[in-house]
Image: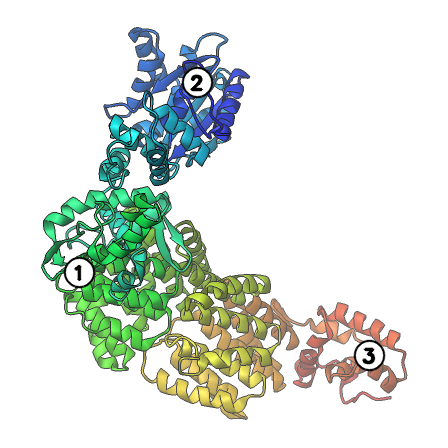
Amino acid sequence: MSGATHPAGGPRLYDRTAELAAVARLSARAAAGRGGVLFVTGNPGEGRTALLSRAAYDFPGTAYRVAAPHHRGPWSAARALFTELAPTPAAGRRALRLARSEGGLVRAVATLAAEGEAVLICVDDLHLWDAHSRAALAAAWQEAGGRGYGRPGRVGWLVSAARHHRFPEVPGAETVRLGRLTTSGARALLGDLCTGVAPASPVGERLLDEAAGHPGVLAAAVRRLTAPQLAGALPLPRPAVDDTVLAEVYGGLLERLPAASRRLLATVAVVALAGRAGADGASTVASGVGGPGGSVPAGARGARAPAEPLEGLIADGLLRRRRGGTVGFEDPFLGRAALASARQSWRGRTRAPGPSGGPAEVLSAGGPATGSTPAADRPAAGAALARGEGHRADRLGASAAVRALSPVALGRAQLVRGLAALAGGPVMYAHEALLQAAELLRGRAPTEASDARFLAMEAAWAGGDVEACLAALDGGEDVGGLERDFADGLSAALTVRLDDARTALTRVVAGEGDADDPRLLLRAGAAALVLGDTAAAARIHARALVRARAEHRTALLPHALEQLAYAELRAGRYSRAARAAREGLRTAEATGQHNVAAHQHAVLALVASVEGDGTAVTEHAGRALATAGPHGLVQAATLAEWALARAELGRGLAAQAAARLLPLVRPGPRGGHFALRMLVVPCFVETAVAAGRDAEARDAAEEYAAWAALGVDGPAQAQLARCRALLAEGEASAYWFREAVRRHDNCGNDFERARTLLAYGTWLRRRRRPGDARGPLRDALVTFERAAAGGWAEHARSELRATGGTSGGTTDPAALRELTPQQQRIVRLVARGATNQEVADHLSLSPRTVDHHLRGVFARLGIRSRVELPGVVDGWDAGREVPASAAGRRPGR
């Protein structure tokens, strides 16, 4: 069954049962006074207009067909509508005045609707309407969908648009997407198209096979054939669906796309062609093609690589991501049409050595769109003919077509491969593809070659491969100015030539004031991070984000937000980092940039470890690692593992946290990310000391000392002093803690300063100096609370209570004097670690009596648990508030 419907005098449709059911629901709502909007979307030639015609024919009330207005302006939509709806020109003018004065198109349409009769308005090709008209229509639909207004509810709107068009958000609107026909449906359509001449069986099968269920392509292919060709008396064109057919169906769509997008579609088609070329042809292309690299669109700086158009075409649905970080066509016919439309311009501009050694056109005559088969593939074509598959023979021979491509075409094809893998695939595959793209484009398309190298460096950076970063930065003679400084500065930093790195990268940061392109600003921000200037990095990345938003560069937003979140993280501003990461995660997921999303999850995991939200740490770290593992994202994986270790440390699992962090601080390919390794060391030293792994902690601290001396991280010297304090003994620890606090005062990272104060206060409390401990602990608590670091704040609050103080002050002296001698003896024993049973045995009491006394003590002292009692006893022994009843007395029987 084809699912065909044949109303008398109406258009015939095939395989559109679900779509017609949606139209029937809209008609029923309009007849019942509820109205509504139904959006219809599909690729060119899939029957949007035919569906609207059928809906208008079937509608029981009055139906109107409205085409896109030829004029432009704020009221062009209203003029187009009322030209169709109004019974007279005068009525149309009155309706237009009504729309202007009383609140929009909805009431004006309702005024023109016949009394008691429902109205269906079919708006065709919404993507061709001007922006003013689309905005006016969207407002009308939202008004009708949101508030109804009674009579407007008797109006149904059936709206069609191309597949890539984004419909507005309308309450209650339904969307249906047209697709290809089944074999039986396409066969029935072919019978309707071939009126007067029944196609011969081989001809019909070939047409059905090449059209692949696309109704528009099938109709265009049939229209160009003569009666003898349909009857089989004359041969068909090879292929039957050739450039002419595809231009008829897809030409309008391609002409309305920007030039950069058309070129990119053709490049992706070349990549797809290479994938079908067999082992020889595929290797010809495959062997040829995060961070601050990137490209800018065509403009004042020259033709650039299509990084952002790629994401835009994916968001529009013209391209789609595939597993493994590649991209392909949602509609294969669109790829062929894009390649055909670009062939003419390529043919006039670029030539490359052909298979015979002489000059050949960019796409040779042996390409699959022209029909002739290259000599290298004639045996395969002959075998296809022998099997009775003559109509398939012309599809062979892509290998020669790929070999005939110019280096620029091959380079751009590899660039697309690399961009796709960088966004959502293995980053080291992206690195290789982008490096080879740079080689193919070098000297031929210098700006694109430069961008390919920076993107390759970005991929290697995300993968944690220093040698690959250097390989990408080396040989970029096509760049100059600040781009040259950036490449030289990074190379110097990666090879620990810091004086050279500072000289070059300082010029890059200083030049950000003259930069207006977001990608150049991102490079300046990255240079600031390498120099250790987190404040400048955050400022520059914020400026890049503002510019990207102002220029509506949606595909660049996730990357800008990723860089901003990381800069805020390095500066210790965790709430700001979380805000940027959450927005970056939304934009990355919306544009299919899964590798950026993994990095944002890792940032959010680190923030959650500060906030003390263990569930969020596990969730975000798990999602980051799920992508980081298969895609080789060493930077994101290191951040995620660091977050998990900090959460484990907060739960008292120091040994587990140290075991997790140890691989991250070790050098080599099995260690953590090279740019994060030293940043993790202070946390590792803290966990290792708590876990009793002092020897490993000392080794890590010594390496950290050498790195801190380089001066590439502001808080490093202060954190080094904290590490030494944790590893020292006796009063040497006190000296290093005080030195760490002093150094923190000059580096500006308040969060790390509070961590040092907490460690210092804890050290003082454990050495029975509660009075001295309260000051550092209160300062740490206030900073943690200000930074919304809930987990750390609770830790500081607990330590403060253990000193006999609270977050609001010291224990009330009057409450201490109210304790009985028995309660004081119990308090001292419990403070030394005795259990209730041990206290009961020592004082000849029952455990229940001991518990009763402890509850009374907690209430009078304003504390919540027995862990706070050591601080109370320390206060007594320091002579600050010693109850008279306890003076000179030791607990005993």
Foreground mark, 3 or 2? 2
Q: What element carries label 2?
A: strand
Work out whether mark 1 precedes mark 2 in sequence or the reverse, and give the earlier one. 2
Question: Mark 1 and mark 3 in contact (Cβ < 8 Å)?
Answer: no
- Give the CA distance from mark 3 to mark 2: 82 Å
Residue 160: x percent and y percent?
Answer: 38, 29
Tell me what residue is drawn at x 53 percent, y 64 percent: 622
Q: Is residue 182 visible?
A: no
- Give the CA distance from mark 1 to mark 2: 55 Å
Residue 797: x percent and y percent?
Answer: 60, 70
Q: Is residue 716 left or right of residue 503?
A: right
Tell me what residue is drawn at x 40 percent, y 83 percent: 667
Which amino acid, mark 3?
Answer: Asn
Badge 2: how crowded within 10 Å, few (<14), some, or many (20+)? many
Q: Is residue 841 left or right of residue 600?
A: right
Work out whether mark 3 precedes mark 1 in sequence or the reverse, and give the earlier one. 1
Q: Is mark 3 on a helix, strand or loop?
A: helix
Q: In which quarter of the image is residue 618?
A: bottom right
Q: In which quarter of the image is residue 212?
A: top left
Q: Which colour scheme is used?
A: rainbow
Q: What element carries label 1?
A: helix
Q: Is residue 364 left or right of residue 651?
A: left
Tell me what residue is drawn at x 22 percent, y 58 percent: 376
Residue under pointer 2: 120
Q: Give whichever of 643, 22 is nearer the camera.
A: 22
Q: In which quarter of the image is the C terminus?
A: bottom right
Q: Is residue 296 visible?
A: yes
Q: Give whichever of 407, 175 is nearer the camera.
A: 407
Residue under pointer 1: 407
Which amino acid, mark 2?
Answer: Leu
